[in-house]
Structure formats: C-alpha cells, structure tokens
C-alpha cells in the first residue's frame, strides 16, 4: 500500500514541477527526500495561531464579542420601552 501512495505522490510532484516550469533536476530521486527540505509540519506549528477545540482562538473571541453585543442590544431594547 505504501508503494502505491509513494508512486502517487511522486507522480503528483513531477506534474507540479512540470507545470511550474522547473527543471527536472528539481525532482529528488527519492520522493521521501521532500520531507527533509525544511517544509515540514513542525515549522508551521510555531507560527499558527492557538486553537481551542479545533477552532482558531480569533474566531472564538469574535463569536463571543458578537454574542455579547447582541445580548446588550436586546437588553437595551427591552429596558428602553
């Protein structure tokens, strides 16, 4: 099964290089060398925003702010009459 995944990944990478107009020397002989090019998932973990329950912290704070705003507007409308 890993053989088929490796061949599929190799084919996709070669198509990407071909369509990008890069020389074929840009394709490593072993497709597993791609992971060692410094573009792994570990590099992005430091720069990504914190997540709570799988959601970005920014989206959670935005939802809470909208909820508080709506609640305030409703209370304002109720007590103004």
Image: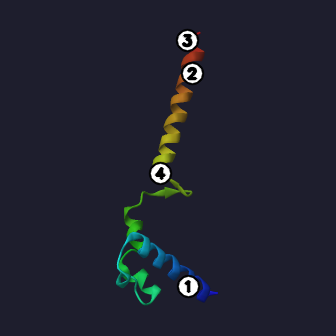
Nearest to the eye among marks 4 and 2: give it: 4
The reply to whether residue 43 is visible in this rendering is yes
Mark with earlier residue (4, 2):
4
Q: Are marks 2 and 3 in contact (CB under 8 Å)?
A: no
Along the viewing direction, whichever of 29 and 1 lies nearer the viewer:
29
The reply to whether residue 41 is visible in this rendering is no
Residue at point 56%, 85% (across, down): 7
Residue at point 42%, 57% (across, down): 49
Element marked by disc 2:
helix
Q: Percent x, y for residue 46?
A: 38, 65
Q: Residues within 10 Å of mark 4 (few under 14, many from 20)?
A: some
Q: Are marks 4 and 3 in contact (CB under 8 Å)?
A: no
Element marked by disc 3:
helix
Q: CA distance from mark 3 to mark 1?
A: 69 Å
Nearest to the eye among marks 3 and 1: give it: 1
Q: CA distance from mark 4 to mark 3?
A: 34 Å
Q: Percent x, y for residue 19?
A: 43, 70
| Residue 39 higher or lower than 75, as above or below | below
> Where is the N terminus found, in terms of image quarters?
bottom right
Nearest to the eye among marks 2 and 1: give it: 1
Q: Are marks 1 and 4 in contact (CB under 8 Å)?
A: no
Q: Mark 1 — residue?
A: 7
Q: Mark 4 — residue?
A: 57
Mark with earlier residue (1, 4):
1
Q: Residues within 10 Å of mark 1 (few under 14, many from 20)?
A: few
Q: Mark 3 — residue?
A: 80
Q: Mark 2 — residue?
A: 75
């Amino acid at each position: 099964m890993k053989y088929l995944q490796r061949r599929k990944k190799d084919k996709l990478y070669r198509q990407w290089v071909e369509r990008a107009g890069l020389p074929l020397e840009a394709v490593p002989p072993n497709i597993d060398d791609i992971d060692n090019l410094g573009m792994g998932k570990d590099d992005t973990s430091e720069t990504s925003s914190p997540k709570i329950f799988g959601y970005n912290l920014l989206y959670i704070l935005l939802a809470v702010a909208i909820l508080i705003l709506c609640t305030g507007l409703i209370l304002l409308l109720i007590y103004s009459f």
